[in-house]
Each structure stands twice: as structure tokens, then as C-alpha cells.
Amino acid sequence: MRHLYAPALFFGFIGLALYLVGEGVSLLCLPALLPLAILLAFLAERFWPYRAGWNESHGDGARDLAHALVNETLNALGIAAIPLLALWLPHVELWPTDWPLALQLLVALLIADLGITLVHYASHRSALLWRLHAVHHSVTRMYGFNGLMKHPLHQMGISVEVAALLAFAIAIQLLLQHSNVDMRIGALRHVFAWAPLHRLHHLKYGTTGDVNFALFFSFWDRLLGTALYLPDYELAEDDLGIGDRPDYPVAYLEQIAEPFRRSDAAHPPAPLPAELRRALVD
């Protein structure tokens, strides 16, 4: 099951969503499927945890629920607004609406993933963007639910159906990226940016985590020169977070306000563990 979990969740739920939408089922089926995916992710984390301690609450459950509810609601409102925007924006025939729905979704994933990856990369280079992005990096454990963060959808003549499927696919991928399942993805790491790669992006040791920026497809990081895979290093339960901000706020409203506060507190960077240093050298 450790080998099957990631591809089964990814292709199973996205394939089911494609089938239902293609058969004309209401788009409301997608937000109804997401809680089932979250439930299965929670069960897998209990049966096959990567780190047992990450299954224990760090006082972050209510906060992560608030993040998920707010961000997924904004996603839903953004999708609902697409037909209204189409009335006001110039009509540009850029999108291949005559292609099969699955192929349209693949194109949307590639375009969105490239844009999201580049914005993510910039968020680690720009001090202003980092203040906003740091909220996500403040997590000190990884489990599927704390990956449900909002990403923008762009208007290119894309249909409501494809936009809704894209938003659903992003939610499923975020579950897999932040999953606390001891998944074994083998050669699929060359294609998909799932948890064994993305966990390294959340390392708290300075710029060590400035790797594996991609949302869906790991080949973007190879093109950027930011790909990292450490098969022989097992993350410790305290390897995650922002090393020079151990006091980063935990509560939801405080996290929302934090990017707009001036912080004069200076903390030394977290020292790189010897075992991780050896793994990076090797």
C-alpha cells in the first residue's frame, strides 16, 4: 500500500472527477468528493505514518481548518465568477475547448503548474513575497490537511468545468504533497512532486529548503536546478518550520496579520544536523 497510495489517490480521484463532469454531473460533486479524499488521507496517515509524532496535534488543527475553509471557499467563489468575468473581459479564443476534457485538464495542469512553480520560486527570493509565503512554512509537522492552500486560477477562455477540475486536482495534489504517509513512489518521483520530495522543501535550516518548488510535476525543478532527493535521510519530527522564527504565531488570525507586522526580533538560524549535512554532501 505504501507503493500504491499516491498514484491511487491521485489518479483515482482525478479520474473519477473527470468521469463525473464528463457525464454531465453537477460540478457540486467535486466539493463533495474532497472530504472523502481528506478522510482517506487521514486514514492512510494513521496506518502508514512517515512520522508518528506528526499525527499528534501541535495545537494547529483549528487553525488549519480555518485556512482550508477560507481558501477553498475563495477558490469556489473564483470559479463561480468565471462566467461573470467572461461577460466583461474580451473574448480570446486561446483555449482548445474542442479537445477531450482529460486533455484540456492536462494542458491546464501544465500551464498552472509552471506559473505556480515560478511564483513559488520567487516567493523564496523576494522579501515581500516571503512575508506572505512564510505562513505556509511555519508548519512544524506535515499532514495532508495543512497543504490545502489557495492558488490563483487565470482566465484564458478556460471553461468553468476545466477550472473546477483544476482546482480539485490542486486540492488532491496538496493532500499528497503534505501527506504524513510513508509512501514509496520510486521512479514516479521523476514526474510527480509528491511528499518524499516536498518534505525537503519544508526543512527549517536556512536556504536548505529552497528546493523542490513544483506543485505537480517535478521536472520543473530539474529545469530550475532546484531538484533535491535524499533517499537515505529520514526527516526528524523537529526538522520542519522556519528555523530563525521559532516564535512564528500559530493562531489563524495572528498568522493572517503577521505579514503586515514589523518584526525586529532576531534569532540565530537553526543549525544544520550533522546527518543532514552528510546526506547533502553525498
Image: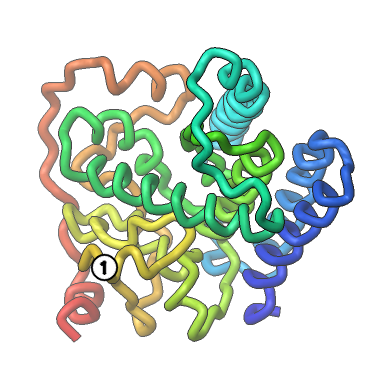
Q: Secondary structure at mark 1?
A: helix
2 or 33: nearer the viewer: 33
Q: Is residue 91 above or below residue 93?
A: above
Q: Quadrant of residue 244?
A: top left
Q: Is 238 on the left or on the right of 156, as rendered?
A: left
Q: Residue at x 24, y 73 (%)?
A: 276
Q: Which residue is mark 1?
A: 223
Q: Residue at x 33, y 47 (%)?
A: 241
Quarter holding the C terminus is bottom left
Q: Quadrant of residue 9?
A: bottom right
Quarter holding the N terminus is bottom right
Where does residue 109 sit, x and y in percent of width and height? Answer: 52, 53
Q: Residue at x 28, y 44 (%)?
A: 242
Q: Residues within 10 Å of mark 1 (few under 14, many from 20)?
A: few
Q: Is 197 on the left or on the right of 132, as rendered?
A: right
Where does residue 67 sit, x and y in percent of width and height? Answer: 55, 29
| Residue 62 visible in the snapshot | no
Q: Is 80 on the left or on the right of 276, as rendered?
A: right
Where does residue 82 sit, x and y in percent of width and height? Answer: 61, 24
Q: Residue at x 24, y 35 (%)?
A: 130
69 or 45: nearer the viewer: 69
Q: Quadrant of residue 7?
A: bottom right
| Residue 23 visible in the snapshot | yes
Type of residue at label 1? Leu
Q: How many marks?
A: 1
Q: Is residue 262 above or below residue 19?
A: above
Q: Is 225 on the left or on the right of 101, as rendered?
A: left
154 or 68: nearer the viewer: 154
Q: Is residue 49 above or below residue 171?
A: below
Where does residue 24 sit, x and y in percent of width and height? Answer: 88, 43
